Image (cartoon, rainbow, N blue to C red):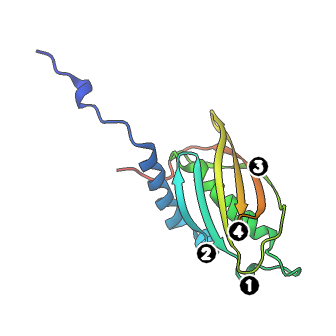
Amino acid sequence: MTENHDAQADPQPDPQAIAEAVGRGMYERDHCARSHGIELLEIAPGYARMTMAVRQDMVNGHDIGHGGMTFTLADTAFAYACNAANESTVAAGCSIVFPAPARLGDRLTAECREVHRRGRSGVYDVTVTTQDGTVVGLFRGQSARIQGKVVELG
């Protein structure tokens, strides 16, 4: 009688569980996100949703939210989405437009979705909105996969 090795093979890792482990691991080491009050709300393969309140120290000389802060939130969501498969990935380039200003006290939400990924490259779109749905940032990021894993999976 022969053994059936296939029946004993480890099941494929769950992509959602991997994404959640990556989210936890990245956030523990993400001093920038934590210092700006950025919170991870949701992560999935090729997807991340994050939030941040516009504080007094994030308002510029025009008394509106500094574009760099909106960019930071969008870029952070991009980072989590493109690393969700546990393949170390960095930004290769990005751009942003600001259709409307953020204001002191706004709660911004950045939602990032993978548009295309092939080989080592990916393209991701992030929409940043206020609590009432006003779009304050439209970000597109290009990613490049590098060597290594984001977290060690048990």
Q: What residue sits right under mark 4 in the picture? A: 132
Say which of 109 and 120 sits in front: 109
Horizontally, residue 7 falls left or right of residue 79, namely: left
Horizontally, residue 1 falls left or right of residue 117, namely: left
User: At label 1, which amino acid type do we have?
Assistant: Gln
User: At label 4, which amino acid type do we have?
Assistant: Asp
Q: Which mark is residue 93?
A: 3
Q: Which mark is residue 37?
A: 2
Q: How far apart in space, not on screen, are marks 2 and 4 (Cα)?
A: 20 Å
Mark 4–mark 3 CB contact (< 8 Å): no
Residue 135 locus on image (x, y percent)? 76, 61
Q: What residue sits right under mark 1 in the picture? A: 56
Q: How far apart in space, not on screen, are marks 2 and 1 (Cα)?
A: 13 Å
**How busy is the neighbourhood of tag 4: few (under 14 within 10 Å), some, or many (20 plus)?**
few
Horizontally, residue 149 falls left or right of residue 7, namely: right
Q: Is residue 126 above or below residue 35?
A: above
